[in-house]
Amino acid sequence: QVQFMASGGGAVQTGGSLTLSCSASGESENSGCVGWFRQSPGKKREGVVLIDRDAHSTAYIEPVKGRFWNTEENVRNTRYLQMNNLKPEDGGKYYCATGKPDGWGGWWTKPDDFGPWGRGTQVTVAS
């Protein structure tokens, strides 16, 4: 299975912006679901954005709606997560991976439905 690698993280002040990238480490089909997840020390990995490439649908968890925006670059099978108005609680290591969630309900709590997990990228938001 192909791993997806996240990059573009960094350290910003509250209210700042970052754009993360997620691309496959090798050849992969541009179909199915991809999820952006994040994890802070001592916390479970949680979903942030779910992209259904077949249905051309995207879902965001409530805390990031209106601040985060995912765009797909189909030619390179790459996605970009634009994160605006960042808050300290947005900090953590961000990952992306393909997955087969069982419906749209509660997908953000089911990281085991995704993987394999590749390299993540650290986002730090100073208060």
Image (cartoon, rainbow, N blue to C red):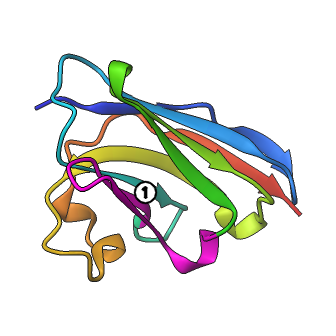
**Towards the viewer: 35 or 56:** 56
- The percent coordinates of residue 65 (x first, y second) are 61, 71
Residue visible at 78% across and 47% down? 17
Image position, residue 11 (x, y; %): 78, 42
The residue at the point 41 percent across, 65 percent down is: 47
Q: Amino acid at mark 1?
A: Phe
- Residue at the spot 54% in from the left edge and 62% down from the top edge: 41
Quarter of the image for the C terminus: give it.
bottom right
- State the image coordinates of residue 81 (x, y, percent, origin top left): 56, 45
Q: Count all numbered tags in the image, as a single digit.
A: 1
Give percent across and percent down for residue 107. 29, 73
The magenta segment: 47-65
Give the residue number, with chain letter if any, for mark 1.
37
| Residue 113 drawn above or below residue 115 | below
The secondary element bearing badge 1 is classed as strand
Residue at position x 78%, y 55% in the image: 125
Up-down relation of residue 70 to residue 74 (above or below): below
| The magenta stretch spans residue 59 | yes
Q: Quadrant of the N terminus?
A: top left
Q: Is residue 102 above or below residue 70?
A: below
Residue 121 vertical position relative to residue 36 in the rendered view, above or below: above
Nearest the viewer among 64 and 13 is 64
